Image: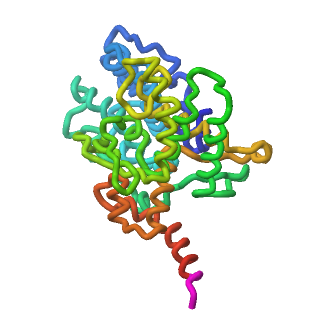
Amino acid sequence: MPKKLPEKQIVINTPPRPELDLRTQETDLKRKPTGDKSLFTWIRWYIAQEVTGTGKSENTVIAVHQELQKFINYFYKRFPAGDYTDWTRQVTQAFIKTLRDAEYSLNSMRKTLSYVKAFSSYLNSIGMVNFESHPTRGAATIKAEKDEYAEEPQSLRILKKSGRVAEEGQPVYERMKAAATARTREPKNKPSALPYRDLAILTTLYYTGLRAHELCLLKMKHIIADEEGGIWFDKIKRKGDANFSGSVYLRKNGLPYLEDYFKREREEVIENHPRGESFVFLRYRGDKLSRADIWSIIRDLALAALTPDMVAKGYRIEAHPHSLRHEITYKLLEDGYTETETAHHLGHASTRYISRYSKRSKKTMASKMESLPD
């Protein structure tokens, strides 16, 4: 189900006039709109020449429409005539501020600006604007506000209908693990169902803090046994790493779930599909999972963890692969690991992001300190 947008974002996404809706306009323009100063017309021409006219995928076309539509909506509310000569660097900066005020995420704002920059570069290339007055110069990047990384990341949570937190942290993980375990005891309802794999994915994400794309790229030949009883996943493709140089340790408590998947499901998948991939986690036809598959599996387990009583009360579980990563980060800090050790385990180059987890960790530390004997 698509996420419902806040009212401020709905306003930005809604064209001020029906004729300014890119989705209802033909984009196969035959003639260059020479002499027309309408920004809307030039964006239509740009899409026709540089997007649909060059064979881009449907998803790309949809993304271009959506992101440039935001800018059109803002521009025509500010300049009803839509004259592109009114577009200056100050207007671009004001547009960014509007997105920020509407509480768009940092990534979403950067994505929107990248499409706006591509369009302005096209105008520059065909001589409609010159370099000195380029409308996106000075707005090349969107920097995070000072408190962007001070906000405490959300771990696994059960939310009430009102939006308040009913439960969070490890108890939520335990609920999801119980639901995943229960599925391994049920008869298979479809050929593609691999419940032992799903349980292994959940526990591996929880114990290692791997990102979804990192989990997808794990290979069997890069599993190394450790004398402590656990295993190392070697040659991990960390974020921003071009050389597959990362590694992460899976402790022995999480190993039985992985071994059950290997014995009960993976061997059968490889037997039925001899050309199956060498990756650790596979689809039932032998090819590797995608990042979207991992997210779908975790969401499915979150739904399965809800009892009928919780559903009746309107409760929901907020869970995705990255919330499991947040959860292991909290656990490491609460158990006494330093920020440097935690950052190294998660594959961060610095401790900058780890400091965001301090609030909940301090709360736990205070509780532990109070329980110390006099």
**309 is higher (above) or lower (below) than 262:** below
Residue stretch in magenta: 370-374
Residue 371 belongs to magenta span: yes
Count the labels in the image: 0
Residue in the foreground of this view, choosing between 95 and 204: 204
Residue in the foreground of this view, choosing between 342 and 254: 254
Residue ID at (31%, 39%): 222
Residue 111, how many percent across, how many down? 39, 38
Residue 348, how many percent across, how many down? 32, 54
Residue 120 belongs to magenta span: no
Residue in the foreground of this view, choosing between 365 and 219: 219
Q: In which quadrant of the rendered image does the N terminus lie?
A: top right
Residue 79, how many percent across, how many down? 44, 36
- Any part of residue 332 in sight: yes
Question: Which secondary structure is most common in the magenta stretch?
Answer: loop
Place residue 302 in its image quadrant: top right
Residue 158, how many percent across, how many down? 65, 52
The residue positioned farthest toward the bottom in the image shown:
374
- Any part of residue 90 in sight: no
Residue in the foreground of this view, choosing between 334 and 230: 230
Residue ID at (39%, 28%): 39
Q: In which quadrant of the rendered image does the C terminus lie?
A: bottom right
Judge left or right: residue 126 versus residue 88. left
